[in-house]
Image (cartoon, grey):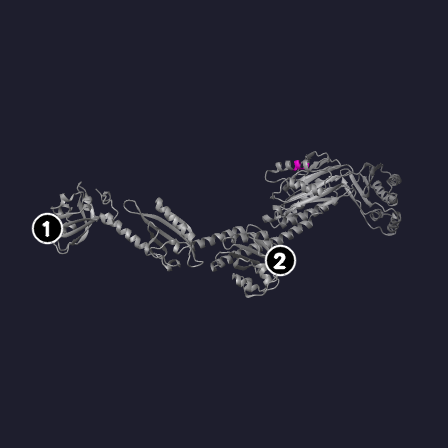
């Protein structure tokens, strides 16, 4: 049998496991203890009177140590003894002489049991000798029996034997630990209290973070005999972990926004409640507008505005947005301005402020300490952050001051990044707004309203634009475009394209031809770009021309979504067109689409950001049409209609910016137009003048008869001279008088100054002097020369016209 299978004792004392025997001078067993009988299975009757050598296997140390003894044999050692069942038992023994007799006392115990006891004693001594790991043994009443805790180990008073935890710890902390220890006594299950806060009842402000492990001590019967507690001071470790986590959280939270005030708000939330009960951030007023703050040495007016509080708590007479009053010059203030973290008690704060009114305004009654430091980044002092402790909380420590310095450094950099972004964003937004047209226009062709919304709820700008360009003959060009990318590069490209559209629109090109030339420009811009991803040039565009005389709209698309037309009765339809490729791609032509538009209809042009809102373009387009059907009324002002459309599509910030252009169409009444067709014969010039004069008289604007006769005479004469087909004359009256002469010739009219001896060449010069503007456009079957004259004042117009004509004739 093995030693591990021998059960030695059912008692509660370790001495009960010790087997003993008394030998005479010949080595005969005289007496045999019950423990020896349990160890080897032999009763005293069976062993007494027999040599002890009979129980020894071989000739080990025990056989040589008993009579007849070997003088060289040790008095202690190991031996194998025979068990009654035939097996052996490995024991450790000691032989000693009983004083006054010749008898010997033999003590023996199983080797494994002795080793176990020696290890237990060594372990206990090792634990009790530690200086960083605490060890305590409590009895069943939780009185301290033994501990290695000293005043030097944890910086507090020692706990003498027989004492209780509540004698050195705060009552609530002692109750928490003792409750856990009683649970261990009752259940036998070990308990581990991690990160347990322990505060001294004798040393104010002294506290520790402890990791406490407790397990029950039992005797051989399993009866609880006490509690063993191992405790480790984790204060420094937890503080380092807390500081690291706080810095990590600060990096994640403070850098999450490019809004100055939100960044300041996140900074206060980082330090509360870890470092204090309250925190406030004050920023220079210049920082809030994105500008560089001025230098602020010493006292005086700090030009600081209170912008953020972690808990919504403010000093007695200060609220969010308030400007701090002038502060007295003080060494504490200058130290904080230099970037030091200044820790002040209530008395020091009051002494530094000096003025009782300032104290009453800025210092709460329950304040006992405050930490203040400046927010400095890139050489600029942006403001300050203050952390407050009130009530019964502990004073600040230098370790906490170092942590605040690190957090304030990161916070200042984040605030400065937000400031710089604010400045650049405002500059970009200003540039964007300057490049966009007025939001509303009112022309004879239509009333328009445009809305631009940056991406990300205003955080990003890009190159979407809209335009309403007044064309000759009362026509109106409607434009929306979307430049690829974001930022200033896209905005600059948008400005160049919008300028190009205006220039091409003045040429009165058809929409397909205008987009073709605009695409050529984009290709040139792409070739000129440096070549980086941010310099990629691309755009889509929709160009439409609406004629209020014919109520027809001609449009073409360069990769752009089609417009939506809403009639006055509320029915909505999507214009079916054949879009060409985006601008700059090339390879495919653009195609014109003509549609009839009833007067009073709402034409909605938009960029992709309006309909691309997470559920796909098709879903966004359906939502747009539903919104137009349900929310748009002819009586509503167009700007209100535009805002209703945006609200109907949701307030969630989009990934792309949005341009929206609404045009409510109008029509020129038929009675305000007149047209004639004449053969290409010089004799018809007089007929054309007469027809125009009669029409002006019918309209009640015969004050323009003289100037219009001259304009019609010159334009019809040129058409008859250079054309081979019929000549058409049209007059349109609205806010201006439009005169158009159309002929099948493609000859370009030229304006030149005739010399004194020239017999001709003054015709177009005279036309230019008599009208506010004139021009020429080409169609598929010839050209049209047009002029515009303002409607006359009631008196004196004819005299002005005669004077102008005379001046032109004189050269």
User: Where's the N terminus, which quadrant?
Assistant: top left
Percent across and percent down for residue 769 are 83, 49
Residue on which disc 2 sits: 323
Among numbered discs 1 and 2, the one appearing first in the sequence: 1
Percent across and percent down for residue 547 are 76, 39
Q: Work out whether residue 442 or residue 507 is closer to the camera in this orientation and state it.
A: 442
Q: Badge 1: how crowded within 10 Å, few (<14), some, or many (20+)?
A: some
Residue pictured at 55% horizontal, 50% vertical? 256
Q: Answer with left or right where residue 263 lies relative to residue 704.
A: left
Q: Work out whether residue 212 or residue 597 is closer to the camera in this orientation and state it.
A: 212
Residue on which disc 1 sits: 26
**Which label number is shown at residue 641?**
none
Tell me, yes or no, if residue 62 can be seen here.
yes
Disc 2, SS: loop
Give how far apart the Cα atoms at labels 1 and 2 are. 107 Å
Range of the magenta residues? Answer: 624-628
Q: Is residue 601 within the magenta segment?
A: no
Percent across and percent down for residue 217 are 31, 48
Q: Badge 2: how crowded within 10 Å, few (<14), some, or many (20+)?
A: some
Prevailing secondary structure class for the magenta stretch in the rendered image: helix
Residue pictured at 70% horizontal, 33% vertical? 571
Q: Vertically, is 97 above or below 480?
A: below
């Amino acid at each position: 049998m093995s030693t591990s299978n021998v059960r030695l004792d059912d008692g509660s004392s370790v001495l009960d496991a010790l087997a003993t025997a008394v030998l005479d001078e010949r080595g005969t067993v005289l007496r045999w203890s019950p423990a020896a009988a349990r160890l080897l299975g032999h009763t005293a009757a069976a062993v007494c009177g027999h040599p002890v050598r009979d129980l020894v296997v071989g000739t080990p140390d025990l056989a040589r140590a008993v009579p007849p003894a070997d003088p060289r044999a040790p008095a202690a050692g190991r031996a194998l003894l025979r068990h009654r069942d035939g097996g052996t038992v490995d024991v450790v023994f000691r032989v000693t002489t009983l004083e006054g007799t010749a008898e010997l006392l033999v003590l023996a115990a199983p080797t494994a049991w002795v080793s176990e006891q020696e290890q237990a004693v060594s372990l206990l001594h090792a634990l009790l000798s530690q200086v960083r790991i605490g060890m305590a043994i409590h009895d069943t009443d939780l009185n301290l029996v033994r501990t290695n805790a000293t005043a030097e180990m944890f910086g507090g008073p020692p706990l003498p034997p027989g004492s209780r935890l509540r004698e050195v710890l705060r009552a609530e902390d002692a109750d928490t630990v003792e409750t856990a220890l009683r649970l261990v006594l009752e259940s036998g299950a070990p308990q581990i209290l991690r990160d347990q806060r322990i505060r001294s009842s004798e040393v104010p402000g002294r506290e520790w973070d402890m990791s406490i492990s407790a397990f029950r001590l039992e005797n051989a019967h399993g009866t609880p005999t006490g509690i063993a507690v191992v405790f480790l001071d984790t204060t420094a470790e937890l503080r380092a972990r807390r500081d690291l986590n706080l810095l990590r959280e600060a990096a994640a939270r403070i850098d999450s926004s490019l809004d100055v005030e939100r960044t300041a708000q996140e900074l206060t939330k980082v330090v509360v409640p870890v470092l204090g009960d309250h925190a406030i951030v004050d920023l220079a007023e210049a920082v809030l507008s994105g500008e560089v703050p001025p230098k602020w040495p010493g006292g005086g007016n700090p030009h600081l505005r209170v912008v953020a509080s972690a808990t919504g708590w403010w000093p007695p007479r200060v609220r969010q947005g308030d400007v701090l009053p002038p502060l007295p010059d003080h060494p504490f203030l200058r130290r904080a301005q230099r970037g030091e973290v200044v820790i002040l008690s209530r008395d020091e704060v009051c002494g530094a402020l000096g003025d009782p009114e300032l104290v009453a305004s800025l210092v709460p009654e329950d304040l006992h300490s405050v930490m203040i430091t400046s927010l400095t980044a890139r050489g600029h002092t942006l403001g300050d952050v203050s952390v407050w402790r009130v009530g019964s909380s502990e004073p600040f420590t230098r370790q906490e001051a170092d942590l605040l310095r690190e957090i304030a450094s990161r916070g200042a950099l984040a605030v400065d990044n937000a400031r710089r972004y604010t400045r650049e964003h405002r500059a970009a937004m200003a540039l964007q707004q300057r490049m966009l047209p007025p939001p509303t226009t009112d022309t004879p062709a239509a009333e328009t309203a445009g809305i631009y919304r940056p991406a990300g709820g205003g955080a990003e700008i890009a190159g979407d634009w809209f335009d309403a360009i007044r064309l000759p003959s009362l026509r109106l060009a409607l434009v929306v475009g979307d430049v690829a990318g974001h930022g200033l590069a896209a905005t600059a490209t948008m400005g160049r394209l919008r300028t190009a559209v205006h220039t091409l629109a003045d040429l009165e090109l058809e929409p397909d031809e205008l987009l073709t030339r605009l695409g050529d420009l984009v290709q040139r811009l792409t070739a000129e770009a440096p070549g980086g991803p941010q310099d990629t040039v691309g755009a889509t565009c929709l160009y439409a021309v609406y004629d209020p005389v014919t109520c027809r709209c001609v449009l073409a698309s360069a990769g752009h979504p089609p417009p939506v037309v809403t009639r006055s009765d509320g029915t909505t339809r999507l214009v079916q067109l054949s879009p060409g490729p985006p601008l700059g791609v090339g390879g495919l032509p653009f195609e014109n689409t003509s549609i009839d538009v009833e007067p009073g209809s709402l034409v909605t042009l938009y960029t992709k950001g309006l309909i691309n809102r997470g559920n796909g373009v098709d879903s966004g387009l359906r939502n747009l049409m539903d919104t137009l059907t349900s929310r748009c009324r002819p009586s509503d002002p167009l700007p209100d209609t535009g805002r209703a459309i945006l609200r109907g599509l949701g307030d969630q910030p989009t990934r792309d910016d949005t341009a929206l252009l609404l045009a409510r169409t109008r029509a020129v009444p038929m009675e305000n137009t007149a047209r004639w067709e004449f053969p290409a014969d010089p004799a018809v010039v007089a007929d054309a003048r007469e027809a125009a004069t009669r029409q002006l008289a019918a309209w009640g604007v015969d004050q323009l008869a003289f100037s219009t006769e001259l304009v019609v005479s010159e334009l019809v004469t040129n058409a008859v001279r250079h054309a081979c087909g019929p000549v058409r004359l049209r007059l349109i009256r609205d806010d201006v008088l439009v005169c158009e002469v159309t002929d099948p010739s493609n000859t370009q009219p030229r304006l030149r100054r005739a010399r004194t001896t020239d017999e001709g060449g003054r015709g177009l010069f005279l036309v230019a002097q008599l009208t506010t503007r004139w021009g020429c456009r080409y169609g598929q079957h010839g050209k049209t020369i047009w002029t515009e004259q303002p409607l006359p004042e009631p008196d004196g117009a004819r005299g002005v016209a005669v004077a102008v004509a005379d001046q032109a004739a004189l050269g």
